[in-house]
Image: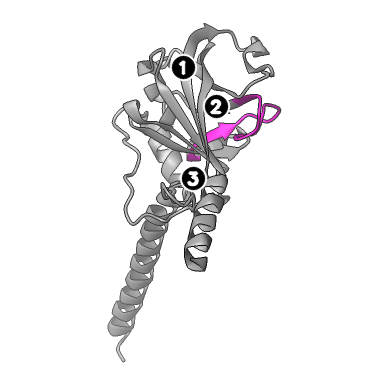
Amino acid sequence: MSPMMRVERALLLTGTVLLGTYLSVAVHSVVSAHLATWQFEETTQTGRRAVVTAEESPSFSRWADSRVAAYKKSLLEWATPAMALLRIERLGLRVPVFAGTDELVLNRGAGWIVGTAKPGDRGNVGIAGHRDGFFRLLEDLQSGDRVELATPSATLTFAVDAIAIVDPSDVYVLGPAPTPSLTLVTCYPFYFVGSAPRRFVVHASIVETVDRTANALSAAAVVGRSLED
């Protein structure tokens, strides 16, 4: 075999390997982008979590370019299941919620603020998100809007009752509450260049809780009685 043919074969092999690597990363990105959301798509009658066959990717139309790049990169680095799914249907917002608020978490989705009530528990649940990513849509939020927080066992619906702009030191907004409530936090102003100096805070109070575990047990009991009859 001539030296030229050896070089051509080496180049062909290298190109094949690179193409395979690219396709593998691309497929992994698409699958990872939807996995956390799929885990919280539930059937309406039985309370079981159902894996859906199609799910839209986030709309990046109002995201900062740097945040889009960080989000896509996080898909390759993050495999921990989400602890909840946050939905605001009027805004078209659907974002997985992970534990913690470090940069990787907030690039991947929204972050549960450690020290506040956990999603599904009684008390004030604090959730943070980036103002130039998922939580940019919060600028269009209005009093009375419904916010859903789905956990593996229940779906809680909250109604927005207060929107405030505070200083970062005003941590009282995350204080405990006697009844289930939800506090969403992001930086403000939304289009500020650099480190934003203030915080945009949304408070919502519980209006409905759907216990899917109870629904599933009830459905199983009905099926059991039917079989006995």
Give the x, y percent position of residue 98: 57, 40
Indicate which disc, 3 or 2, sits on the residue closer to the N terminus.
Answer: 3
SS type, badge 1: strand
Point out residue 79 in the picture as x, y percentages from the top left corner. 55, 52
Residue 152 visible? The answer is: no
The kind of residue on which mark 1 rests is Val
Which secondary structure class fits the magenta region best? loop
Q: Which residues are magenta?
A: 108-125
When asked about the image quadrant of residue 2, the answer is: bottom left
Nearest to viewer (mark 1 / mark 3): 1
Given the image, on which type of amino acid does mark 2 rest? Ala
Query: In the picture shown, does residue 167 fall above or below 32?
Result: above
Distance from Cα at disc 3 to Cα at disc 2: 17 Å
Q: Rounded to the nearest whole Å, what is the CA distance between mark 1 and mark 3?
A: 30 Å
Between residues 195 and 129, which one lies in front from this camera angle?
129
Q: Residues within 10 Å of mark 3 (few under 14, many from 20)?
A: many
Residue 14 figure quarter: bottom left
Q: Quadrant of residue 168?
A: top right
Most foreground residue, 144 or 142: 144
Say above or below: 202 vs 71: above
**Which residue is most to the front?**
229
Q: Which residue is rendered at x = 53% and y = 62% of the image?
A: 224
Residue occupied by mark 3:
74
Q: Is residue 102 above or below residue 226?
A: above
- Local SS, label 3: helix
| Image disc number at residue 128 | 2
Q: Earlier in the sequence, mark 1 or mark 3?
A: 3
Residue drawn 37% across and 66% down?
18
* Residue at mark 1: 160
Q: Is residue 63 left or right of residue 84?
A: left
